[in-house]
Image (tube, rainbow, N blue to C red):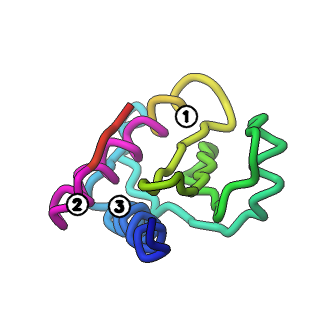
């Protein structure tokens, strides 16, 4: 396991968030919302406690768009790096967390990095 793998995973999530205004347009009645997302660093222990993780992740940050917040915990096992996407609320935030995970997988696949989404 190489720490460069963690950096690559973090960069992939950030690239999805940066590209989000072009990819993710939300419709509210007759208005199309193209609000850029915000990425904020979160202390890993806060994410551990908030989501009941057994260990403190190597890195953590939150992605916010409008009132939807997704915490992202990045960590590593013996041979793999992984990110876990936690919505802070139910409903559309859960759908948005899945959207972020899927697009992060796609961003890594474009870089020829083997990815498993579970």
10 displayed left or right of 59: left
Estimate how packed mark 2 is, as few (under 14), some (14 to 19) or many (20 or more) residues with alpha carbons within 10 Å: some
**Callout 1–callout 2 Cβ contact below 8 Å:** no
39 displayed left or right of 57: left
> What segment carries the magenta color?
97-114
Q: Which residue is mark 1?
A: 93
Q: Position of residue 118 (x, y in %)?
A: 39, 31
Estimate how packed mark 1 is, as few (under 14), some (14 to 19) or many (20 or more) residues with alpha carbons within 10 Å: some
Say the numbered circle drawn on residue 30.
Answer: none
Q: Which residue is mark 3?
A: 16
Q: Position of residue 85 (x, y in %)?
A: 54, 43
Front position in the image: 109 or 32: 109
Marked residue nearer the N-terminal end (2 or 3): 3
The residue at 38%/56% (across/down) is: 34
Q: Main secondary structure of the magenta part?
A: helix
Q: Is residue 110 magenta?
A: yes
Front position in the image: 45 or 1: 1
Q: Which residue is mark 2?
A: 113
Q: Quadrant of residue 9?
A: bottom left
**What's the CA distance linking mark 2 and mark 3?**
15 Å
Estimate how packed mark 3 is, as few (under 14), some (14 to 19) or many (20 or more) residues with alpha carbons within 10 Å: many
**Callout 1–callout 3 Cβ contact below 8 Å:** no
Say if 37 sits above or below 105 in the image.
below
Front position in the image: 114 or 40: 114
The quadrant in which the N terminus is found is: bottom left
């Amino acid at each position: 396991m190489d720490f460069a793998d963690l950096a690559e995973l973090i960069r992939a999530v950030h690239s999805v968030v940066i590209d989000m205004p072009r990819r993710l347009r939300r419709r509210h009645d007759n208005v199309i919302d193209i609000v850029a997302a915000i990425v904020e660093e979160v202390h890993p222990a806060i994410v551990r406690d908030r989501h009941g993780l057994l260990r403190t992740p190597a890195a953590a940050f939150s992605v916010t768009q409008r009132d939807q917040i997704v915490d992202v915990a990045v960590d590593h096992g013996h041979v793999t790096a992984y990110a876990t996407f936690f919505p802070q609320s139910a409903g559309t935030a859960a759908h948005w967390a899945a959207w972020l995970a899927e697009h992060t997988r796609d961003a890594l696949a474009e870089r020829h990095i083997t990815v498993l989404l579970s």
